[in-house]
Amino acid sequence: MHTISTQSAPAGKREFLSFQLGGMEYGVDFCKVKELLTFQSLERFASEGAIVKGVAVSRGVIMPLVDMRVAFNERAASPGPMTDVIILQLSSCVMGMLVDGVTDVVRLYPDQITPIPGMTRENGCDYLMGLGETDGRRLILVDIDKLMSIRRETVTQQAA
């Protein structure tokens, strides 16, 4: 299990947990993170799918495991010793997210976050919050609640 500082961010700053996927660095709102685990430490059961890597149990909570390596890269190697699982508390559920590796917690002021060129709500990318830049690093900031609700909204809209 990883330990991450839980110091609160100074006023005006937001905290993001940064992680690697296919050589790129991403960030999710640190407030959504419940726990960090290695993939091998999780008790897993149920069959695997392309993106949903089955179901796991952590601290008595049963949750789906979503392989973000497949979701963002369309291909991913088998989980290895560096594969991490970020346990998230979303607005609708608890879930585990497989990533290539967790980096750290990044604190950003609003002026350090810029829109991603060409990404708009109209082209279906409203789950990308922007690019965070600090100390020569660039993070693609993801609204994980919006990203995980895409399929459900699409299915609901098609049924109407």
Image (cartoon, rainbow, N blue to C red):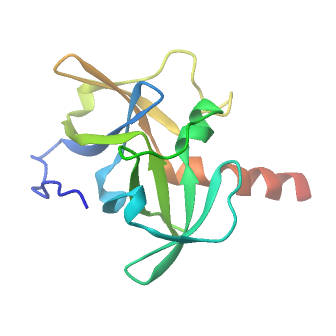
Q: In the image, residue 48 lies at what x, y percent?
A: 68, 59
- Up the image or down, 31 lies above or below 60; here it is above
Q: Residue at x 50, y 15 (%)?
A: 117
Q: Is residue 124 left or right of residue 17?
A: right
Q: In the image, residue 2 lies at what x, y percent?
A: 23, 56
Residue 126 in sight from this viewpoint: no
**Quadrant (top left/top right/bottom left/bottom right) for the C terminus:** bottom right
- Up the image or down, 91 lies above or below 120; here it is below
Q: Which is nearer the eye, 78 or 95?
A: 78
Locate residue 42: give its quadrant: bottom left
- Up the image or down, 40 lies above or below 21; here it is below
Q: Residue at x 11, y 47 (%)?
A: 11
Q: Is residue 144 left or right of residue 36?
A: right
Q: How many marks?
A: 0
Q: Which is nearer the eye, 143 or 49?
A: 49
Residue 49 in sight from this viewpoint: yes
Locate residue 1: give its quadrant: bottom left
Locate residue 120: give its quadrant: top right
Q: Residue at x 16, y 20 (%)?
A: 135
- Up the image or down, 130 lies above or below 142; here it is above
Q: Which is nearer the eye, 144 or 104?
A: 104
Q: Which is nearer the eye, 25 or 131?
A: 25
Q: In the image, residue 26 lies at what x, y percent?
A: 39, 34
Q: In the image, residue 4 lies at what x, y percent?
A: 17, 54
